[in-house]
């Protein structure tokens, strides 16, 4: 099972772009990269997924280089409400497979 | 409408007691999970059920017994509670391929405190 490594914490100010990089050197061919967000006292919430190149949705962008050994979650113009823990996961797209969470990156946004 | 709901939200009990946590999802998903988040915020899978059938059973003490009466419900019963069982327990659901397998929906969590 691929292991992910990401920074334990990051600090930012409102309005800035935040990039969180995750390394997954042992990613397998059929693995997907997915990111979850967890606010205090809430369950994790899916935010974005990708296999290669770039994916963008209304919440974030995900950049994946050709070798897929790392990925970068980009949050444009963060606000205070983006303060949360962000988890990078590598996931084999099979029914019933559990998500394997690491320690995540705690993002703190200040005004 | 809450997609994945859990009851109770908070549970305080004494060592040795038996307790249950209930989970219900109204998304029509066919797979449900129990995750445990410990005091260090580490989130770990405990069980997974697909169409009422157990498909993942991680190394969890047999004091923990999941029960799925139907596709929409997955309850967690814990016997002889220990101090180390104190944690937040999350229920989740998914359905492949629509939505994709990596997209799981989590409940609000049940904070269990054993004294």
Image: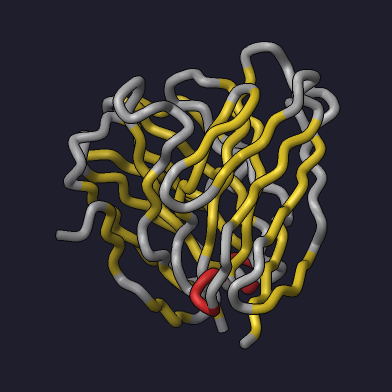
Q: Is residue B70 visible?
A: no
State which quadrant residue A108 falls in: bottom right
Name the residue located 80 percent from the left edge and 19 percent from the top edge. A67
Outermost top residue: A29
Horizontal side, residue B20 vs residue B69: left or right: right
Q: How is the image coloured?
A: secondary structure
Horizontal side, residue A80 vs residue B4: left or right: right
Residue A73 versus residue B54 in the image, above or below? below
On-image quarter of the N terminus of chain A = top right
Name the residue located 46 percent from the left edge and 53 percent from the top edge. A59
Q: Is residue A20 visible?
A: yes
Q: Position of residue A53 (x, y in %)?
A: 64, 25
Between residue B112 and residue B41, name the one nearer to us.
B41
Residue B1 versus residue B113 in the image, above or below? above
State which quadrant residue A43 falls in: bottom left
Q: Position of residue B49 (x, y in %)?
A: 38, 32
Q: Position of residue A96 (x, y in %)?
A: 44, 26
Horizontal side, residue B23 vs residue B90: left or right: left
Name the residue located 65 percent from the left edge and 62 percent from the top edge. A17
Between residue B57 and residue B19, name the one nearer to us.
B57
Outermost right residue: A25
């Amino acid at each position: 099972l691929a292991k992910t490594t990401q920074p334990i914490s990051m600090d930012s100010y409102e309005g800035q772009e935040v990039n969180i990089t995750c390394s997954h050197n042992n990613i397998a061919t059929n693995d997907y990269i997915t990111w979850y967000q967890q606010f205090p006292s809430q369950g994790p919430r899916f935010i974005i997924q990708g296999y290669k190149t770039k994916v963008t949705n209304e919440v974030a962008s995900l950049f994946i280089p050709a070798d897929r050994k790392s990925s970068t979650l980009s949050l444009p113009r963060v606000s205070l409400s983006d303060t949360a823990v962000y988890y990078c996961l590598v996931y084999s797209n099979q029914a019933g497979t559990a998500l394997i969470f690491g320690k995540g990156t705690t993002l703190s946004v200040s005004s | 409408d809450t997609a994945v709901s859990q009851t109770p939200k908070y549970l305080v009990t004494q060592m040795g007691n038996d307790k249950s946590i209930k989970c219900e999802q109204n998304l029509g998903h066919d797979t449900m999970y129990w995750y445990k988040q410990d005091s260090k915020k580490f989130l770990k899978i405990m069980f997974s059920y697909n169409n009422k059938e157990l498909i993942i059973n991680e190394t969890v003490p047999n004091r923990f017994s999941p029960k799925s009466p139907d596709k929409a419900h997955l309850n967690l019963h814990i016997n002889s509670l220990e101090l180390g069982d104190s944690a937040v327990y999350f229920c989740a659901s998914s359905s492949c391929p629509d939505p994709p397998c990596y997209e799981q929906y989590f409940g609000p969590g049940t904070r269990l405190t054993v004294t």
